[in-house]
Amino acid sequence: MATQESQKEVQISFRTTPENRRLARIEAAKLNMSLNEWIKSLVEAELDTSSQETKSS
């Protein structure tokens, strides 16, 4: 039987400096993404990494 992971949508809020926001927008633009899409991809990549580490433990 295949396992089905539940997916939840979360809202993340954080404060940053205008300079950090500018640099993040540049990094996102390099990948042709919006700032929100870029942040989401970083979070998902980190979740995948931590999930794999948990499974191998």
Image: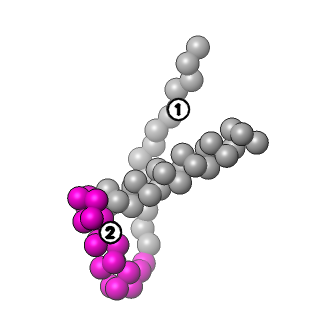
Q: Measured from the top left, where is residue 57 in percent x and y?
A: 76, 42
| Residue lying at the far right of the rendered structure | 57
Q: Which residue type does callout 2 highlight?
A: Glu
How many angstroms separate mark 2 from mark 1 (CA)? Answer: 30 Å
Q: Quadrant of residue 33?
A: bottom left
Main secondary structure of the magenta stretch: helix
53 is higher (above) or lower (below) than 33: above
Q: Is residue 53 left or right of residue 27?
A: right
Q: Measured from the top left, where is residue 46 in percent x and y?
A: 53, 54
Q: Residue at x 69, y 44 (%)?
A: 54
Q: Which residue type does callout 1 highlight?
A: Glu
19 is higher (above) or lower (below) than 44: below
Asked if residue 11 can be seen in this view, the reply is: no
Label disc, if present, on residue 28 of the rendered structure: none
Residue 24 among those drawn in magenta: yes
Q: Are marks 2 and 1 in contact (CB under 8 Å)?
A: no
Residue 26 among those drawn in magenta: yes
46 is higher (above) or lower (below) than 13: above
Q: Residue at x 43, y 52 (%)?
A: 10
Q: Quadrant of residue 30?
A: bottom left
Q: In this figure, which residue is indicated by the disc labeled 1?
A: 5
* Nearer to the camera, 27 or 18: 27
| Local secondary structure at mark 1 | loop
Nearer-N-terminus badge (2/1): 1
| Residue lying at the far top of the rendered structure | 1
Range covered by the magenta-colored residues: 15-35
Q: Measured from the top left, where is residue 48 in percent x and y?
A: 54, 46
Count of numbered labels shown in the rendering = 2
Q: Is residue 46 left or right of residue 27?
A: right
4 is higher (above) or lower (below) than 19: above
Q: In this figure, which residue is indicated by the disc labeled 2?
A: 27
